[in-house]
Image (cartoon, rainbow, N blue to C red):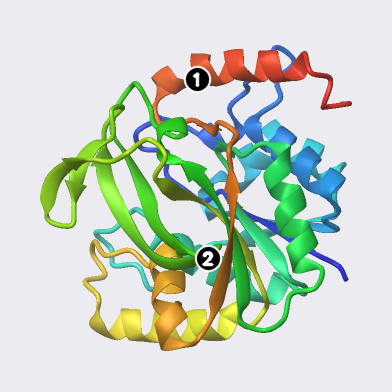
Amino acid sequence: MNTTLVVMAAGMGSRFGGLKQATAITDDGKGILDFSIYDAKEAGFDNLVIILRKDIVDEFDKRIGQRLKSMLPTTYVIQDTSNMPSNRTKPFGTGHAILCAKDAVKSPFCVINADDYYGNHAFFEIEKYLEQVKEKQYSMVTYELGKTLSKNGTVTRGVCSLENGYLKTIEEVSKIDSEGNCIYKGKEQKLDGKTPVSMNLWGLSLDIFNILEKEWNEFLNKADLTKDEFLIPTIIGDSINKYGVSVKAFSNKDKWYGITYKEDLDEVKDAIKNILKEDIYKF
C-alpha cells in the first residue's frame, strides 16, 4: 500500500522571527526537513505533500523545496485563508492545515511539523502501521517530555494519557518551562520528565478528512475566529469518544530536536553534527 508524508509548514514562526521551515542547520545548507524527508523515504513513504502559506511558497521552494522534490514526488498545498477575519494574521491551526490537504492526499498518511527533527525510528514505526491500517485506526509517536523542552523559553506540548499502548486522552498544555513547570489541570505543577507528549507526528487513515470537515463546520459556527485555533491533537483526542477512533501510541526514547526560538538553532546544529557522525544519512 502506498503511504504519504504530509508536512505542516504554514506556521508563522513568530517566536523564531523568520522562515524556520527552511533554516539551514548544516554547513552545506540543509534544513531539518531534508533529514525528515530522507528518513521518511527510507521508511517506505511514496509521496510528499507540503502545506504552506501562499506568501512563503516562492522562498520555501527556492531555499529547500527543490531539494525535497528530488527525494520524493511532491505536491504543494496552500492553507486556505478565505475564512480568516481581516484582523487575524495567524493561520487557524494544524487541524485546518491538514483539512486543506484533502484533495492532495490519496493514501494513508503521516503528519509532521516542518521544524521538528523526530529521529528515523519514528518514521519506520508509523509507516509499517499505515501499511495495514483500517478505517478509524490512527497512530502517533510520543516522546518523553524532558527530551522535548527548550532552554530558551516556554513551549506547548500535547500531554498524553496512555492505556495498553493506546492514546486515552491528550491535552494541549502551554507555557511549559525547561524544568517541566506549567499550569496543568488548573493548577501550578511540575510534570515528570518521562511524561509522554505528542509532537504532532500522527499516522492517519483517509477517513480523518470526514471528521475534520464535520468538526471544521462546527468550529466556524461556534469559535471566535479572531483568535481560536483548530488543532489536530484536540480533534483526535475528542474523536476517540465522539467517533470511536483508536490511536496506537508508539513510544520513542530518542531525543527530539526542534527550532522554537532563534537560540535553539545552535543546539540543533550541534546535535545534527553528532548524528551525522553515525553515518545514518547518505546525502
Q: Residue at x 44, y 22 (%)?
A: 264
Tell me if residue 8 comes above or below residue 274 in the rendering: below
Specify the quadrant of the image occupied by residue 179. top left
Q: Residue at x 88, y 71 (%)?
A: 1
The foreground one among 254 and 217 is 254
State the residue position of label 2: 164
Query: Where residue 174 is drawn, which disc sits there?
Result: none
Q: Amino acid at mark 1?
A: Leu
Query: Where residue 265 is drawn, which disc sits there?
Result: 1
Regarding residue 113, the answer to whether it shows in the image is no
Q: Earlier in the sequence, mark 2 or mark 1?
A: 2
Regarding residue 274, the answer to whether it shows in the image is yes
Tell me if residue 52 comes above or below residue 270 in the rendering: below
In the image, residue 253 lies at what x, y percent? 58, 37
Element assignment for label 2? loop
Element assignment for label 1? helix
Q: How many marks?
A: 2
In the image, residue 32 lies at what x, y percent? 64, 32
Which residue, as the protein is rendered here, is positioned at the far left?
Answer: 187
Which residue, as the protein is rendered here, is positioned at the far front?
Answer: 164
Quarter of the image with the C terminus is top right
Dots 2, 1 in contact, CB < 8 A: no
Separation of marks 2 and 1 at Cα, in angstroms: 37 Å
Binning the other alpha carbons within 10 Å of mark 1 as few (below 14), some (14 to 19) or many (20 upward) gives some
Tell me if residue 203 comes above or below residue 239 in the rendering: above
The foreground one among 175 and 113 is 175
**155 to the left or right of 202:** left
Tell me if residue 257 comes above or below residue 189 in the rendering: above
Q: Amino acid at mark 2?
A: Asn
